[in-house]
Image: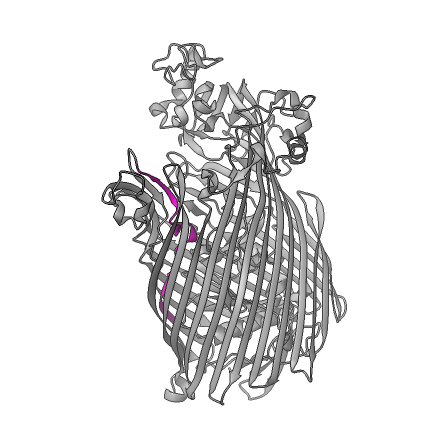
Amino acid sequence: MKLFIARLTLCCSTSAIIAGMASAQTTLPAPGTTASAPAPAAVENSSQTSTSLKTDLPAGAAEEIVVTGFRASLASAISAKRESLGAIDVIKAEDIAKFPDNNLAESIQRVPGVSIGRDAGEGRNITVRGLGAQFTRIRINGMEALSTTTSTDSSGGANRGRGFDFNVFASELFSAITVRKTQSAEIDEGSLGATVDLQTAHPLDYKKTTVAASAQGNYNDLRKKVDPRLAGLFTTKLLNDTVGVLVSGAYSRSRKYEDGAGSVGFDTTATNGGYCSPIGFAPANPGLSASTGTTATSCSTGVPRPANTADNIAAYNTVNAGNGNSVHAPRLPRYGRLTHDQKRLGLTGSLQWQPTSHTLLTFDTLYSKYHATREENFIEAFSFSRALSNNGKPQTAVRQAVVNGAGDLVYGVFDNVDVRSETRFTDFTTKFQQYTLNGKQDLTDWWTVTGSAGYSKSALTVPIDTTLTIDRPNSQNYSWDYRDNSRRPILNYGFDVNNPGNFGFINGTSEIRLSTASSINTFKNATLQSNMRVTEGLNVKIGGAYKKFKFDSDATSRADNSLLVPGLPAGTTVADLTRTISGFGKGLNVPSPTPTSWLTPDVDKFVKVFNIFSNTGTFLQTGVANSSARGNIRNVTEKDKAGYGQVEFNGDPLFNFPLRGDIGVRYVETNQASQGYQLVGAAPVLVLADRKYHNWLPSLNLAYSPTQQLIFRLGASKVIARPDLGNLTPGGSITVTGARSVTVGNPDLDPIKAKTLDLAAEWYPSRDSLLSVAYFYKKISTYIQTLQQDLPFNQLGLDPSLLNNSTTVVTDIFTSRRPFNTDGGPLKGFEINGQTSLPLNFLPDWLNHFGVLANYTHVTSKITYILTSAGGVPVTTTTAALVGLSKNAANATVYFDDGKFSLRGSVAYRGGFLVSVPGQNTGNDVNGQSKITTVDANATYQINEWLKVTVQGLNLTDAYVDQYQDSSRNSPFINTHTGRQIYFGVGVKF
């Protein structure tokens, strides 16, 4: 049965109507024919999205079926997938708009094989088929771009890499998303996972002048605040419909709490010198030292050892099992609240000129400003993470101790514990701008030339990042208890944490940390392509591309390492520097007697009393001269020149064989320049490095259609992903006396390379139904890890002038620690994707408007991680999955849409994944994140042709983000939640 889909019309967003761009005229080709990109078509952009379909019936009679709304967008997306020569997945505007999504990452997670990472309860970046954000390239209106922001440390901190942060953008700004999972020669190189195309709206897609707007309230049930979410669009045509103008905008604010518990990692009890041993216990721990005041009766000056009792000795023996190497304990057991305040503004503009059907010029602009403040408030015991020199763990006495079967110290009572209340405040802004010009010219009826030029800039600035503490040294009778719930420990501080009189602001103990940061990414792009139709069903594309990418990172930090704090002015007390956190723990079920309110440093009061942001005197911040900032003062520039040839073919008219596809090769030359600072002796030295390399990247895509409803696909290619930016710096430190050593990046790294194979079978039983199965295999031949090697200096790729003013020569051996290319490993998996609309023949008519979408992805990988090496030769290794890879991921949506009323519910599942291998701290094989399931819903009612009302819910089950340490112990690292998001509002369109 031949199936034609005509007039697939995209509608406006329910949540923000501007995403509704009218669509182009789209007709599904009969299988075995090559689909060409449709020209912009003028279609009626009515308030009711509709799709007109004609079906060839067995009797020869034509029946026209009209579907509307969400079903129309699904049919349009299926049409694009079916027509494509390569393996792609598409989301049209109705998809983006009517899912209750904060940003683009949460929209893209509906695509098979895509999972997202979250920060502050929002999607931040994506993983495609197990490959993280650094392996995925993003193009906006056809041009590669990179947008970065910052986050909590547990979510990755400031992004100084190649991963794209989607939370900078509102989803309302875009009309379509295409995820390209196989490579063609004409597609930009740089991706192992996928190339994601984001498309904004164009005015010539609209038939009439259109004005649209929406307004919503955004309510968070944890913060209990209502915030605005606004959007608008205007488009019109001029000069006999040859010129089109479109502008759109979106603004939103989001205020949230993020409440939870954490440990900041588990260390062995021997780490940092171990606990203080009882009197008379041999050997005394720590050893006797006049400089620290440790004696046979004192842990340190003024801190007596525990008495020599059976209970004290039993507790000490428990925590000191295996000389303290067999037991793990939390470093900073704590509860905390993070207060997020985010504002997001986005603007787009598009100008199109189409004087004839053979000429089209499009100029697009995109601007986004993402501004946020984040305040983190923690009440914590910090003795356990410090050595004796910092008044740490060796001062602490163990009174009671219980270790579970996994080896974690799950219950303990301690004396001489330093308790801290900490406030960290961060203010940051990302400004993104992009300008693109695209042109298309038909020179003859068989020869078309296209070209483009563009510029984008993403500027992340962090003008304030400060941490303030108040402290109480040597608290008695402190305890933690993880026995009943490892994610909800009982923490008893042994004193009233709300009383200012119980805390001090102490020079040498309390801290004022100050820093700033910035990260700027710019792209300059240009492309030119000649498309020649040699014969019917045979096209030849020849093209070239130029791209200049520059990454600039800068930083400053307080010069005195934060521990030097001023004394309180006369008449000023701790109460004058603090405020109280209250109402903590809703939904956490914090066990008693854990406090749900506590005293915390107040940033505004510190500014008023000490003028901490003056950048003068003791609060002066420096850059290159400061070791805390120097490593983030660096840049990388890449100039890429590419040329390609690609043949697209359709076997049907030539050989009466329903095979179509493309075959081609891309050549790319990369010129790389990087710089950073090396510390030689006491002097920082700027180091420059240059590198040139090239790659040949062949690719093949085949689509075979034995019937009109069935397509078999094959894709094969060689692909590369350039090294992450942090690994390319030549900066670091050099020790030229004593034990010679170098800690440095590696500008000579090769790209991560892979050979890929994709196989798929797709069945299209009806206009808006699909069932597909895909298998993918990636042989990753190079990976990047940091290794230790002993090499002559002249084999390290560093400038010999760095050894000036020393007696060291270039042939002397240095112990270097730097990133190297290592063997990779295989990655393989499969996807199952299905969607269908009802009715089925045996169901009643009222079920005609229901439908289901579902997909499942399974991925495995095997990477050999080198834990230790000698002379560059691995000594100990471990085999684990690729970092960021979830073995299982799934999405499902059930919907009802009759054009008047629309209701949808969606579930997204992401399996657990590894964050780092080996894990942080001592004795942890991995850091990881547990599985997470989120539930969203959307309801829309169309009151009349110009007015609709919406209600949306995000994260309705208030899913928790849970991170852990060690694969066998599953020790708690961080566990937080941000509450449910409810949107309600109206949308209008004229």
Residue 187 visible in the shown view: no
In this rendering, would 737 be left or right of 671? left
| Rendered residue at 70%/44% (across/down) | 224
Q: Is residue 715 magenta?
A: yes
Residue at the image position 51 percent from the left and 62 percent from the top? 145
Residue 938 versus residue 767 in the image, above or below? above
Res 814 → quadrant: top left
Percent position (x, y) of residue 626?
A: 47, 38
- Front residue of 858 and 739: 739
Relative horizontal placement of residue 542, taking residue 985 as reference (left or right): left
Q: Residue furthest left?
A: 811
The C terminus appears in which quarter of the rendering?
bottom right
Q: What segment is highlighted magenta in the picture?
A: 714-736
**Which residue is at 63% across, 35% downward?**
585
Relative vertical location of residue 456 with respect to residue 411 in this rendering, above or below: below
- Decide if residue 22 is in sight here: yes
Determine if the magenta segment contains residue 894.
no
Residue 83 percent coordinates (x, y): 48, 76
Q: Nearer the viewer, residue 148 or 522?
A: 522
Residue 779: x, y in percent?
32, 60
359 in relation to 424, above or below: below
Which residue shows up at 41% across the image and 18% down it? 316
The residue closer to the viewer here, 148 or 499, is 148
Q: How is the image coloured?
A: one colour
Which is more toward the observer, 78 or 54? 78
